[in-house]
Image: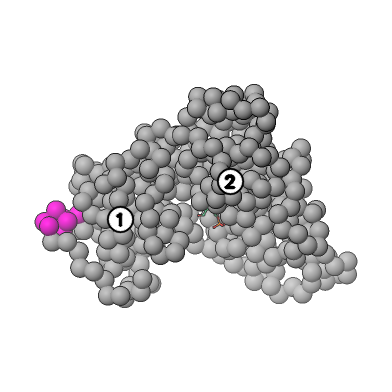
Amino acid sequence: MDHDVDMDRAVYLDHNATTTVRPAAAEAVAAALSLTGNASSVHGFGRAVRRAVEDAREAVAALVGAAPADVVFTSGGTEANNLALRGAGRERIVVSAVEHESVLMAGAGAALIPVDSEGVVDLDALDSMLAGEGTPALVSVMLANNETGVVQPVAGIVEVARRFGALVHCDAVQAAGKIPVDMGALGVDMVSLSAHKIGGPAGIGALVVADSVPLSPIVFGGGQERGRRMGTENFSGIAGFGAAAREAGKGVDGFAGLGRLRDALERRILAVSPETRIFGAGAGRLPNTSCLTMPGMASETQVMALDLAGVAVSAGSACSSGKVQASHVLAAMNADAAQAASAIRASLGWNSTAQDVDAFVDAWTALHVRAEAGQGVAAPAA
Ligand code: PLP
């Protein structure tokens, strides 16, 4: 998609896809890049890099209430999820039906825990799924969904899982920095994180693993990360991740305030279009995410038209290759197919403003008026 959009004036409401890099994270990356050295080298150059890595490890651990030694740096959330599902050594894997593709694909063949129409995992179903099998399983359920923002009852999932000796992994990639994440309070064994969702650079993340979990590596090499993820550390990315984690940790309270902007956005859309459906609105959600329908207009068409109007949103998470597919998340919620096909996601970030929401509501309303008038939407220039 290559339209003539004035990027300086465009409004970005796609922060669940990736968020703006925080200035402190950009500075930390630049400072790390000015260092020469390999974190594994024993000389002074290497030790300086090691200090930057360990400093970041502390910050990332603090974001989720874990010990620094539990943090295993990876190339991002996708690899963290793969490491959790493939490295924990459990043959039987049970995941929710609304997980990110990286969990669904790493756990190919896993049993799927159903969700209700609000997108919340069915604890009774999990109970019977675990009761029916002899071998202890690995259960993987995300803390917050990337498409709808729906927050899962992870502590309740842990309670059920423990009765059957199951390990629990939680993909907290979308939740971190947006709501408090405390590994101890949740009781989970492993947590996945991704820097670019909290204001750090893309291509760096972590699996935070409790000491008690015997994790085997899925990438082999020089023994880095205490043999849990080998390969020379991406130390500039790690430094940026650490700085972003510090800022995101301080910003969690401010993030709750974004809920007022998101709620105002939804109220205004419903006033214009009472037939709009907001997915997951009846459940606890992240304060920044809204997944909403424009009846009669395809998601892709909306995304392109809004882009032309200078507002960037997403048609769902499955557009990584530029091709929008039906959302497995909305399908699992038993959404009406026509509604699912007209859903878009607006997601606010740490730097979003009331003016951004105004711009979205104005552009959405104008599009809705055109749709109602049956004028359709001109295809953008290729
Ligand atoms: N898990 C969730 C819930 C996500 O939303 C994403 C990214 O969209 C990932 C995992 C993958 O993270 P990364 O982009 O760092 O590989």
SS at badge 2: loop
SS at badge 1: helix
Tell which tag, 1 or 2, sits nearer the viewer. Answer: 2
- Would you call the spot at circle 1 few (<14 residues within 10 Å), some (14-19), or many (20 or more)? many
What kind of residue is marked 2?
Gly
Residue 369 is covered by the magenta coloring:
yes
Question: Between residues 318 and 309, which one lies in front from this camera angle?
Answer: 318
Can residue 301 be seen by looking at this rendering?
yes
Question: Between residues 12 and 370, which one lies in front from this camera angle?
Answer: 370
Q: Is residue 56 left or right of residue 48?
A: left
- Residue 107, labelled with which disc? 2
What kind of residue is marked 1?
Ser
- Residue 299, labelled with which disc? 1
Please give the name of the residue rendered at 63% of the width and 37% of the height, measured from the top-left corner. 92
Return the x and y of residue 72 as percentages of the image width and height. Answer: 71, 52
Q: On the image, which quarter does residue 34 sit in?
A: bottom right
Question: Between residues 131 and 74, which one lies in front from this camera angle?
Answer: 131
Residue 107 is covered by the magenta coloring:
no
Quick one: quadrant of the C terminus?
bottom left
Question: Between residues 156 and 227, which one lies in front from this camera angle?
Answer: 227
Magenta stretch, residue numbers: 368-374
Please give the name of the residue rendered at 71% of the width and 54% of the height, measured from the top-left corner. 218
Quick one: quadrant of the N terminus?
bottom left
